[in-house]
Image (cartoon, helix red, strand yellow):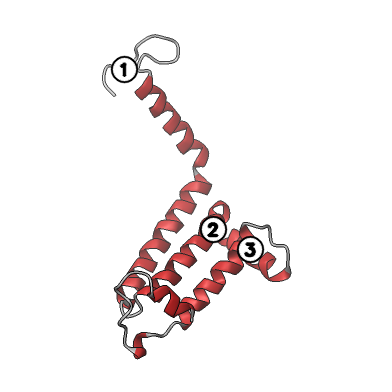
Amino acid sequence: MIGGLARRFGNQARELDPEHRRDGLALLLLAASVIVASGVWLGGRNVVSHLALVVVAGVVGALAWAIPLLLAWFAWRLLRQPQDSAATGRVAVGSSALLISLVGLWHAELREISIFLLIIIVLALKPEGLLGQRQVEKV
């Protein structure tokens, strides 16, 4: 029922063969997205959502708020294009690698990166510096 509802949007997925209408993994990802969202966004008010919060926050830390969105996006992609599983696998691997690298940068070097970006912004907006004397000719 949910898979059929998702396939009604647009006109790509309406004429799927019945053998391509395997929605189990997509519905599992959608349920996981709802559970993780209740844990991460609502604070884990019951045992299941608290466990989801602990696991997701332990794995990705400060970017845990993005995991329910990512899970829902993958569920939507699987519901809309179940026959394109090879591309979905590549997208999943690439998104996971990007998320892991962003989490590493976020946790390890957040202060240094933010200070460096602040210096670049100040030099771009006010090349003469904060004290009024031009230090650099070209940035």
The amino acid marked with disc number 3 is Ser
Q: Residue 136: which disc? A: 1
In this rendered view, identify the residue nearer to me: 131 or 65: 65
In this rendered view, identify the residue nearer to me: 29 or 16: 16
Where disc 2 sits, the SS reads helix
Quadrant, the C terminus: top left
- Marks 2, 3: nearer the viewer: 3
User: Is there CB contact under 8 Å for labels 1 and 2?
Assistant: no
Q: Which residue does the numbered mark 2 point to in the structure image? A: 60
- Marks 1, 2: nearer the viewer: 2
Residue shown at the point (68%, 57%) measured from the top left: 43
Q: Residue 85: which disc? A: none
> Residue 17 occupies which quadrant of the picture?
bottom left
The amino acid marked with disc number 2 is Val
Crowding at mark 1 (Cα within 10 Å: few <14, some 14-19, many 20+): few
Where disc 3 sits, the SS reads helix
How far apart marks 1 and 2 lie (CA) works out to: 39 Å
Who comes first in sequence, dot 1 or dot 2? 2
Question: Seen from this angle, which residue lies furthest right?
Answer: 46
The amino acid marked with disc number 1 is Val
Where is residue 130? Give x, y as percent.
44, 15
User: Is there CB contact under 8 Å for labels 2 and 3?
Assistant: no
Q: Residue 38: which disc? A: 3
Who comes first in sequence, dot 2 or dot 3? 3
How far apart marks 2 and 3 lie (CA) works out to: 16 Å
Who comes first in sequence, dot 3 or dot 1? 3
Where is residue 98? Give x, y as percent.
40, 57
Rendered view: 100 above or below 6: above
Residue shown at the point (59%, 65%) measured from the top left: 36
User: Is there CB contact under 8 Å for labels 3 and 1?
Assistant: no
